[in-house]
Image (cartoon, rainbow, N blue to C red):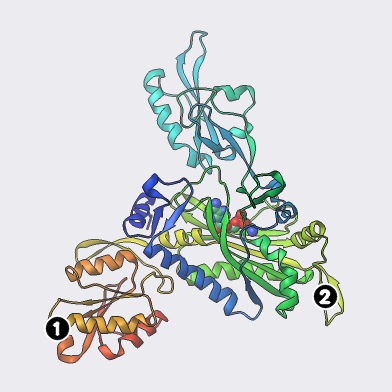
Amino acid sequence: MEVEMDKLVSLCKRRGFVFPSSEVYGGINGFWDYGPLGVELKRNIKEAWWRDNVQMRDDMVGLDCSIIMNPKVWEASGHVGGFSDPMVDCRASKERYRADQLYVFVYIFPAVNHKGEPTEAWLAGLGASPEDAAEAPEKRAAKLAKKFGKPTDPPTVIPYMQIDVADREKVIGPSTEDRGTLTEPRSFNLMFKTFVGALEHESNVAYLRPETAQGIFANFKNVVDTARVKLPFGIAQIGKSFRNEINPRNFTFRSREFEQMEIEFFCRPEEAPEWYAYWRKARFEWYTSLGLKSEKLRLRDHDAEELAFYSTATADIEYAFPFGVSELEGVAHRGDYDLTQHMKFSGKDLSYFDEERKERFTPHVVEPSAGADRATLAFLCEAYTEDEVGGESRTVLKFHPRIAPVKAAVFPLVKRDGMPEKAEAIYRELKKHNNVYYDEKGAIGRRYRRQDEAGTPFCITVDSQTTTDDTVTFRDRDSCRQWRVPAAGAAQALRDLLEGRSIPEGA
Ligand code: GAP
């Protein structure tokens, strides 16, 4: 089903998945807070990633580096010199745009000006592609058409970066009515700068890391010397990264503070193509194993022009979000670029000695680099469903049980006849192993709907039959099927269901 972003954002706010950061003060662009349900969802995603990529493997170790590192790290990595986006400022509105996301739509109207020339309007729109950017200029052109007549042809679309300097004066920015208010594109470094220590002096400048990967390279020797690892092996890290994005947009998709889940997988140079193929497939399958099953998940290989100069192959795992197809994760064959750079800048030997072959060399690396917030958003989009149950419409988040924030909700049907006591005892037992929820307020139908919206896979109800045969009702979120389970076996039954055991026949 096609998800409307507005509806998803509103559900996230209403049910406590995601809030705008510091909202009581009007928020701050590009920063988000995860509420009680959101934090559980995101933690489950990170824990699934850690479990599957680190703990379940024999060839992976973990790391947790500091966010602020010696600034030389970022000189070596190329971030000080090259981690920038072209930006354009609007002198009138004070808005700032990414120049590579600005498109100018040139409309020609039949009305002539005092020189007898047709009227032109150069209307700028903002978006990841011309199609994305078209909506606002189209609306403005429709208004102008009332005055100047219907445009003769569809507009010519020119990326702002390709517009001649002289013609920039004609452009009307996305948030102004005036011409010529947009500046020249300028390079803008995306790293957040700060000062370490009391003196705000250039010599004390440091950066909030824009990726977790460089902390892994900087610790390569420490890990090799202490963890008894042998090639091929990987180092994994989950942590916050910060980028002063010019245009944070599309909810949490492009934020200024976000979390990454990154692996640097080191191997012998001749084995790197095989490991690249392995990780490209393994990472794609990880998303499908957690429920991103639809054709919205895609794998796209970079063509030669897109590749970084040191990379021989890179693929993006993409998801068709409601706002367009965008990157969830990149898997890159980076050669020996990073270790070589850090050797050059630190003067330390980061080569590897192969004991068996008595050979010293610089390992090659394959980097699967994912974003925890983007993964969370994709799982939310995929799970969001509107359907009808018993003639009533409902909104349900069909999360895979492994990532569902709450695994089960326990209800007494009514607040009497010993039902609350029995339900609470079951709840306490289940809570020892899982995040479960207890609710005794309101009509049972409403309680089910609330859990459907939270994405809770199972509900367990203590009802009047419980008092006679000591069984409880289990209810499945997706199919709404119900069946009875002995109260004493409720914990085991839930464990089985969460592990993928199917719902009993005839339920
Ligand atoms: N070490 C390689 C690296 O950082 P990247 O493609 O810039 O590569 C990797 O980032 C992943 O981090 C992206 O695929 C995305 O999931 C996440 N990411 C990057 N910038 C982000 C942002 N501004 N907001 C949210 N997630 C972001």
Mark 2 residue's CB less than 8 Å from ligand 1: no
Between 15 and 324, the one lying in front of the other is 15
SS type, badge 1: helix
Q: Residue at 40% across / 63% down in the picture? A: 38
Q: Measured from the top left, where is residue 479 in percent x and y? A: 29, 72
Q: Measured from the top left, where is residue 405 in percent x and y? A: 39, 69
Q: Is residue 383 visible?
A: no
Q: Residue at 54% across / 35% down in the picture? A: 103
Looking at numbered disc 1 in the image, what kind of residue is underneath it?
Ser
Q: Write down the quadrant of residue 285 in the picture.
A: bottom right
User: How busy is the neighbourhood of tag 1: few (under 14 within 10 Å), some, or many (20 plus)?
Assistant: some
Q: Residue at 38% across / 18% down in the picture? A: 147
Q: CA distance from mark 1 to mark 2?
A: 70 Å
Q: Quadrant location of the C terminus?
A: bottom left
* Residue 464: image tag: 1
Disc 2 target residue: 353
- Residue 4 relative to residue 305: left or right: left
Between 128 and 470, the one lying in front of the other is 470
